Image (cartoon, grey):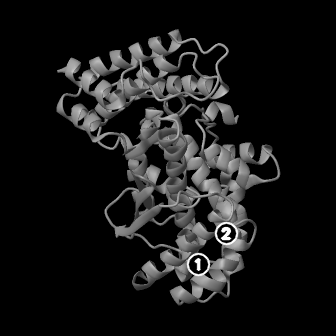
Amino acid sequence: MRAAILALLCLVGGCASNPASPPAGGAAGGDALDAIARDYVALTLEIGEREPGYVDAYYGPAEWQAAAHADPRTLPQLIQGAATLSDRLNAVSVAGADPVVRQRKAYLLAHVAAASARLRMLSGETMSFADEAEALFGIRPELRPLSTYDPVLAEIDALLPGAGSLTDRVTEFRSHYVIPKERLQVVMDAAIAECRARTARHITLPANENFTLAFVGDKPWSGYNYYQGNSQSKIEINADFPIYTERAIDLGCHEGYPGHHVYNALLEQTFVRERGWVEMSVYPLFSPMSFVAEGSANYGIDLAFPGSEGTRFEREVLFPLAGLDPATAEKKAQLMALTRQLARAEYTIADDWLAGRVSRDETIERLMKYTLADRAKATQRLRFIDTYRSYIINYGLGRDVVQAWVERQGPDHWQGMETLLSSQTLPVDLD
């Protein structure tokens, strides 16, 4: 049956002796990389059969997915398969090849290494939080003592003085900016439309790109983009918890424009359609790709709404649509800017929790204190950590690393962003 699957991959994707044409100057190693790329897709799809959710998106031939579903290898066989792919990649010479071909090899090596690490985890291997993050996402987070975030809490305390715990005061203050559920659709539509318009001024989007939007519940996340291929996405927003006006902008940019929807659409256009590089037709969630995806999606919020533009858009457009009073919008913006400085405290909290050093109740208390979330929201966040573990580094650390890289490329930050979103750039390349 394995031979039949490989034969099917060859039949659908073209035999290794007749690959998609590489770019000029990139012939060296081209045939071997095309063959390896097809086997990498097969490996990823089969891991997805062993771990639901591992494949975040796939828009390659349906026959490949059917083959993986029909006869997935066992975990030991998949581990050996990943090792074989690494050996084959290391044997490919790209000396004198076009830089994009050399980068292609590096990209495949990094993603096969991440797949190997995930397979070992599925087989029972345990790693520290930082080791796991580095193995899966290609970058090592710094774990700071929680006390280093206390000065930020003190600033927030001064911004919102009063009786009761700081978390309670923040929750009460923010309650004035909750979008009523009956107005969620119109507010989200307006936010996403503005995110798209601002992005389209700078990045040429595929002509047929589009998305559907749905509100869901009982999820560990607040929003999710399910990329469907052919420049189409399904965006889901978790409506179980309050959605604030600034969060409408965040979700519109992060899940849509210039975030996940645009990233996936540009990758599909650049690599799958124009070059025939099949490895980009599959997105493994636990991979270096996610560091770039989440980091660029979060940085995209600041790129689309620099400075005070987000606050102004909230005040002039979203508040009226939501029926809210904009009187303290600027104070809310100050609070959000300070809260952002607490983002990496979660890494230390997750490290202690996942290593078993801190109890569940204490972990929830820590999340309440350092993310300024109420108990219900902190409990949901712990559910996210339980589900995705070290994936959480991709948001705050990812945003900061992506921002630094983009802004080093020159004064046109949108051009730097488009370059990133259309490339096989790895986290190690951003440092």
Label 2: how many Cα within 10 Å (few below 14, some 14–19, many 20+) = some
Label number found at residue 81: none
47 or 119: nearer the eye? 47
Packing grade of label 1 (10 A; few <14, some 14-19, many >=20) is some
Pick whichever, 211 or 10, lies toward us: 10
Amino acid identity at mark 1? Phe
Residue tagged 2: 335
Residue 141 vertical position relative to residue 169 in the rendered view, above or below: above
The kind of residue tagged 2 is Leu
Residue found 53% across the figure and 12% down from its top:
92
Asked if the residue under mark 2 is in contact with the one under mark 1, i.e. CB atoms within 8 Å, the reply is: yes
Q: Quadrant of residue 309?
A: bottom right
Q: Which of the image's four quarters has the C terminus?
A: top right
Residue 251 shown left or right of residue 17 in the figure: right
For image coordinates 52% across by 39% down, the residue present is 271
Which quadrant does the N terminus fall into? top left
Q: Residue under circle 1?
A: 173
Residue 359 seen in the figure: no
Q: Is residue 9 left or right of residue 401?
A: left
Please tell me whether mark 1 sits on a helix, a strand or a loop.
helix
From the top left corner, tell me how far across and down residue 357 is, in percent. Answer: 45, 37
Number of numbered discs: 2
Q: Earlier in the sequence, mark 1 or mark 2?
A: 1
Residue furthest out toward the right: 411
Left or right of 220: which side holds 423?
right
* Residue, far top: 91
